[in-house]
Image (cartoon, rainbow, N blue to C red):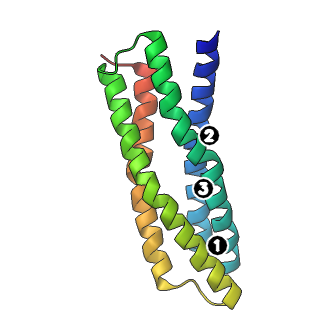
Amino acid sequence: MDVIVVKFLHVLSSTFLFGTGVGTAFYLLVASRSRNVQVVAAIARYVVVADWIFTATTIVFQPLSGLYLAHRLGYPLSSPWLYWSIVLFVIAALCWLPVVWIQMRLRDMAVEAANRGEELPLRYHGYLGAWAALGVPALISFLVIFYLMVARPA
């Protein structure tokens, strides 16, 4: 019974991880394009909070539950689908670490600009570009991981 529970939690956790990433990226990009500093500041605050609540917890839980399931179900880590899932997860996690820092800078710049009644500074857009660029390999990694988890190709 515990394998079913962990499997359920693993899938639920991956849903939170992926959904939070796609959702927060959408809202921050749309808000930033609006150039409405008050909106950007509010959304950026929520993006940072959501990342800490959902992404930080699931990015820890996913490998723990995945390794537990692989062990319990007898899947060797050397299986190509599992090996590449782990490699891609590490790539996505390594992209996420600077993204968290960038999101906090974006939030701080937007809040400061909103408080001063100013436009977003030019460097905001540079940080936003780096943030989006790091999101692409993370998104692709997670999409391939979902495929590998479902198909388990040899």
Cα separation between marks 2 and 3: 11 Å
Which residue position holds label 1?
40
Quadrant (top left/top right/bottom left/bottom right) for the N terminus: top right
Q: Residue at x 48, y 12 (%)?
A: 72
Residue 63, percent from left and from top: 47, 32
Q: Residue at x 45, y 61 (%)?
A: 132
Image quadrant in which you'd find residue 152 = top left
- Which mark sits nearer the N-terminus, 2 or 1? 2
**Label 2 residue SS:** helix
Secondary structure beneath dot 3 equals: helix
* Observer able to see residue 2: yes
Label whose residue precedes the other's in the sequence (2 or 3): 2
Q: Which residue is mark 3?
A: 24
- Identify which amino acid the numbered label 2 is placed on: Phe
Q: Residue at label 2?
A: 16
**Residue 128: % across, % down:** 48, 69
Amino acid type, residue under disc 1 in the picture: Val
Q: Amino acid at mark 3?
A: Thr
Q: Position of residue 136 (x, y in %)?
A: 41, 53
What is the x, y in percent for residue 10? 57, 27
